[in-house]
């Protein structure tokens, strides 16, 4: 699935930006400001982008058996040895700042954005799945579902530059495949249609925008730069550069070749129904 990435940053560049933002937060903090404690606890002790991402992703996921510190060490081992994965996480983080009109920067995303945290946890679980450590991958998925309200099966496949806005209620099935630079809002489901086994979940190509509450069901394709309207139920494939809207979804034309996932344009030209 082809990429439509535009604003690329290396992990080192993102790390520099994060430290600069942290310095500004500290400079603006009043005496006793709890935010200063947060920066001092999470950012300042971190030695690298990998270290900080691992610590933030593990935060709140630990329990009395598998601690937060243990998970952070696992994440650092996974991320630290894989430069491509580091670049992917950096692209995801950058996507939040580029596409979210409510963004307050990279550091705020890393500290507070539940959708981003859930995506990073998925990426750790996916690598564990590929490495054959399936029980730990399932444990991470279960913790993310309970603590974040985000259920992404560890076997599903995501490209880079993914933006999950809010994240609450997101469900992504086992055989789903998502391309690069895809944006999805809360309540999206990429699911099956029954008790069938095998390849049974959607294939979402690059540049796609999935609106809030959209349900895409079955082994169908959402083509490059397509859009699915909020609350729509999609049961058949959507061609590239088209929009699906309604229950069940119908297809309307979309002559604009700008990727809706990056423009976040949710205006649907219903007068061009196919």
Image (cartoon, helix red, strand yellow):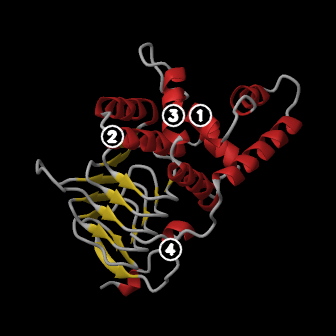
- Circle 2 crowding by C-alpha within 10 Å: few under 14, some 14–19, many from 20: some
- Circle 4 crowding by C-alpha within 10 Å: few under 14, some 14–19, many from 20: many
Q: Quadrant of the C terminus?
A: bottom left
Residue drawn at the location 58% of the way across and 43% of the way down? 113
Residue that label 3 marks: 77
Q: Is residue 65 above or below residue 232?
A: above
Distance Cα–Cα, label 4 vs label 3:
35 Å
Q: Is residue 250 above or below residue 181?
A: below
Left or right of residue 82: residue 18: right
Q: Are marks 2 and 3 in contact (CB under 8 Å)?
A: no
Q: Are marks 1 and 2 in contact (CB under 8 Å)?
A: no
Which numbered circle lies on residue 100?
none
Judge depth for marks 3 and 1 and give the one in front.
3
- Circle 3 crowding by C-alpha within 10 Å: few under 14, some 14–19, many from 20: some
Secondary structure category for the residue under label 2:
helix
Chain-order first, disc 4 or disc 3: 3
Residue 237 percent coordinates (x, y): 25, 71
Q: Quadrant of residue 49?
A: top right
Which numbered circle lies on residue 56?
1
Residue lying at the far left of the rendered structure: 196
Residue that label 2 marks: 129
Judge depth for marks 4 and 3 and give the one in front.
3
Q: Are marks 3 and 1 in contact (CB under 8 Å)?
A: no
Residue 96 percent coordinates (x, y): 59, 54
Q: Nearer the viewer, residue 246 or 19?
A: 19
Residue 238 percent coordinates (x, y): 30, 74
């Amino acid at each position: 699935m082809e990429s439509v990435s535009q604003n690329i940053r290396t992990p080192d560049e993102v790390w520099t930006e994060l430290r600069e933002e942290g310095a500004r937060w500290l400079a603006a903090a009043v005496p006793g400001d709890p935010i200063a404690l947060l920066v001092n606890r999470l950012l300042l002790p971190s030695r690298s982008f990998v270290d900080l991402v691992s610590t933030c992703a593990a935060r709140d996921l630990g329990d009395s058996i598998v601690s937060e510190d243990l998970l952070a060490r696992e994440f650092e081992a996974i991320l630290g040895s894989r430069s491509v994965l580091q670049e992917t996480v950096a692209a995801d983080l950058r996507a939040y700042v580029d596409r979210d009109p409510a963004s307050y920067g990279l550091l705020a995303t890393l500290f507070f954005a539940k959708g981003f945290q859930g995506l990073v946890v998925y990426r750790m679980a996916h690598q564990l799945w590929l490495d054959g450590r399936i029980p730990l991958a399932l444990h991470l998925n279960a913790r993310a579902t309970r603590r974040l309200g985000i259920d992404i099966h560890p076997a599903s496949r995501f490209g880079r530059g993914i933006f999950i806005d809010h994240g609450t209620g997101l469900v992504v099935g086992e055989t789903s495949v998502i391309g690069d630079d895809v944006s999805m809002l809360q309540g999206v489901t990429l699911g099956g249609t029954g008790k069938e086994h095998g390849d049974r979940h959607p294939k979402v190509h690059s540049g796609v925008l999935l609106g809030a509450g959209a349900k895409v069901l079955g082994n169908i394709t959402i083509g490059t730069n397509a859009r699915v309207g909020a609350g729509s139920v999609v049961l058949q494939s959507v061609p590239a550069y088209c929009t699906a809207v309604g229950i069940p979804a119908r297809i309307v034309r979309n002559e604009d070749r700008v990727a809706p996932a990056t423009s976040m344009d949710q205006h649907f030209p219903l007068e061009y129904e196919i």
